[in-house]
Amino acid sequence: MNAKLLCFLLSGSLASGPAFFQAQADDQPQWGQAWSRNMVSDERNLPVSFDPRTGSNILWSAELGTETHSSPVVAGGRVYIGTNNGHPRDPAEQGDRGVLMCFDEKTGRFLWQLAFPKRDEDIYFDWPHSGISSPVTVEQDRAYFVNNRGEVLCLDVASATAKAEGLPPILWKFNLTTEAGIWSHDAAHSSILVHGDYLCLNTGTGVDNTHRRIRTPDAPSLVVLDKRTGRLVARENEHIAPNIFHSTWSSPSMGTVKGRPLIFFAAGNGIVYAFDAPEAAMRRSQEPTASAASTEHPASSPANPPVFLNKTWQFDFDPASPKTNVHLYVSNRRESPSDFFGMPVFHDNRIYVAGGGDIWWGKNEAWIKCIDATRSGDITTNGLVWSYPLQKHVLSTPAVYNGLVFIADCGHTFHCVDAATGKPCWTHELKGETWASPLVADGKAYVGTRSGAFYIFSATRAKQILGTLDFGSPISSTAAAANGVLYVATMNRLYAVGRAR
């Protein structure tokens, strides 16, 4: 299972809402659009024709490690990407490491890196050579990310910029294992969502090295931290952990439904949840009618236990799947629970989410489903708008654009589906499995595969292939677009693609 570096490219920040991103529209400061997680960009004039071998329309390229599963993030004149230490840049950092690299956006000049030693208690805590799989989230002069050790870090990136060769100070660090009580599995991954003063993220808790046991059954799957201090302030309380089939790969999204901000979360037990935004839980914990435990420990106290997020609805993604003794189905390719790798995407009061049997341990079936986000309670039956079967296991996050949904799966197929009805518009056979998610930008849909093939489609109802090329190295990372430039990361190199200036 040396390939399990979770394509957490999927997998992979706003100040207090989407307005922050509107003000910074040309940057790509987190994975996907604002709260919604929709990987659709407003960038224009991106080239269709480019060639990494000849350098045609390649503005610059930079060497990474040997395994890169994180996606590039562009903000404040810098490009951030997680990788491993396969090509050491710092002689003092030798051996297997998780590495966060930072490059100059215009020139590709290497600016700095932060390297983190691997956890060595058990390889399933921090899979060898997988590096840092999480994308960075940048808000103004702060960068937030989860490193390979399952630690959430806040960096002061403005201080690093002000120095000629300075590393960004780490303002705080939160250890998900020791401080939230999780059990890490394979490779830590989360794309952190910023909401006001809060950070919302999945924890990465999962099974142990036998893949048949949950060691921390009370561990949270979704947590909320105070972005100023890193303190744990809220968590879900849905008792998800015992029924996690593999791990908690999917990062949360958000959206406003009927004037109410909600967190959407696809959990490792195969259920999609909607929770009230964290500020609602914080207010409720301080009301005179709150429970004795809540009033005895007000949420504003640093010594407090976290408050519980209020669930609005839940949707069982695969209601016919096994619900008890789920780990008896490990390695069963015909029958198993479902789980998620990609994120739920919020668009026009609907959730678009892909899931199905686990790529390493579960059944082959997979689907993309559309859920009515305006419902409440258990919406498994009355919340399903449509369901579309995919070819095989899915790791991608869907991209919703102009009435269409684009997604790729591990059955070597790219799909274009009608967003309103779930009816197929077209499919295309790809060379290789797809772990990355599609990016839609400039009216085009971009996606790379594990064979190193990279495809450019017209993001339209009628199939049109605009270009195909071979990067010569597997692609796990989702492409990004910012300031007129397309960024594509292979396992060992980052490319900035744009029209010659």
Image: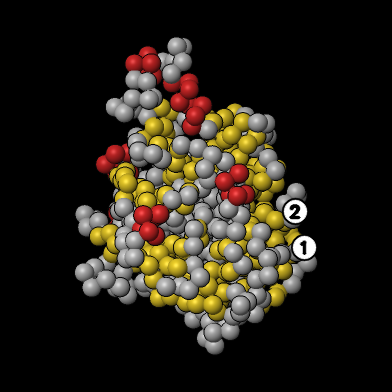
Label annotation for residue 367: none
The residue that disc 2 covers is 403
Q: What amino acid type is highlighted by mark number 2?
A: Gly
Badge 2: residue crowd in 10 Å (few <14, some 14–19, many ≥20): few
State left or right for residue 30 relative to residue 116.
Answer: right
Depicted 87 relative to depicted 336: above or below: below
For the point 70% across and 74% down, the residue is 465
Residue closest to the eye, 321 or 360:
360
Give, as a three-letter code, the residue at label 1. Answer: Arg
- 85 or 344: nearer the eye? 85
Q: Please name the residue shown 67% across and 31% down the image.
A: 258
Q: Position of residue 501 (x, y in %)?
A: 61, 77
Q: Which residue is drawn at 35% across and 38% down?
A: 229
Circle 1 crowding by C-alpha within 10 Å: few under 14, some 14–19, many from 20: some
At 68% across and 40% down in the image, what residue appears? 349
Q: What element carries label 1?
A: loop
Residue where numbered disc 1 is placed: 461
Count of residue discs = 2
Residue lying farthest to the right in this orientation: 462
Task: Name the secondary structure under disc 2.
Answer: loop
- Going from the N terminus, do you reach mark 2 or mark 1 first? 2
Q: Are marks 2 and 1 in contact (CB under 8 Å)?
A: yes
